[in-house]
Image: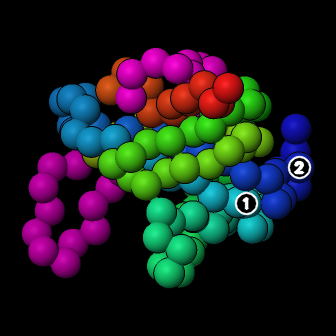
Amino acid sequence: MQLEDLLLKTCVIGVSYFDLQGELMKQNQYAGQVLKVDAEQGISIALRHADPAVAAADFILPPQLDAWFKAPPGQYRHAPSGVDMENPDYLVTWNVYRTQDNTADGQHEWWEWVPNTERPQVGQSMDAHPAHRQAPPH
């Protein structure tokens, strides 16, 4: 797969944030469509929002393909984040690690983005796996 293959594809994104000790701080989930790709600038995704009146925000992921996996068909819902997408093209998961202690106000915080190269498990608890799939209704 090449970066250009992602253009206009839909995805569900799970991001887990860890502190300096490697303890999970929080998990976020997003859904959207890839708008542009750049080997240096990253993969730009127009995020979908649960409220259609809210304008889509862009979310930029690092330009690595290791974290991108074909998504099994189904309805992907995560009520806390408002994510609701039917049959996305890809599931994407990243682990983000804080790399320096607390900084003073106005100072840059450093985070290391690490692609999760293990295929996401679907149909599991959201606490265990950021990419969650509900079975389609019968």
114 relative to 56, above or below? above
Tell me, yes or no, whether the highlighted magenta stretch contains residue 119.
yes
Crowd rating for badge 1 (residues with CA inside 10 Å; few <14, some 14–19, many 20+): many
Identity of the amino acid at label 2? Answer: Asp
Of the 4 image quadrants, the one containing the C terminus is top right
The reply to whether residue 15 is in sight is no
Way the structure is coloured: rainbow
Instruction: Name the residue at 83% across, 59% down.
Output: 7
Q: Earlier in the sequence, mark 2 or mark 1?
A: 2
Taking the image as shown, residue 99 lies to the left or right of residue 83, namely left
Looking at the figure, which quarter contains the N terminus? top right
Label 2 – label 1 distance at C-alpha: 10 Å
According to the image, label 2 marks what residue?
A: 5
Total labels: the figure holds: 2
Identify whether 5 is placed above or below 72. below
Q: Nearer the viewer, residue 126 or 134?
A: 134
Q: Position of residue 127 (x, y in %)?
A: 33, 26
**Magenta stretch in the rendered image:** 100-126
* Residue 127 seen in the figure: yes
Q: Nearer the viewer, residue 127 or 66?
A: 127
Looking at the rendered structure, which numbered label has been put on residue 34? 1
Q: Secondary structure at mark 1?
A: strand
Q: Is residue 116 magenta?
A: yes
Residue at image point 52% right, 33% down: 131
Which secondary structure, mark 2?
Answer: helix
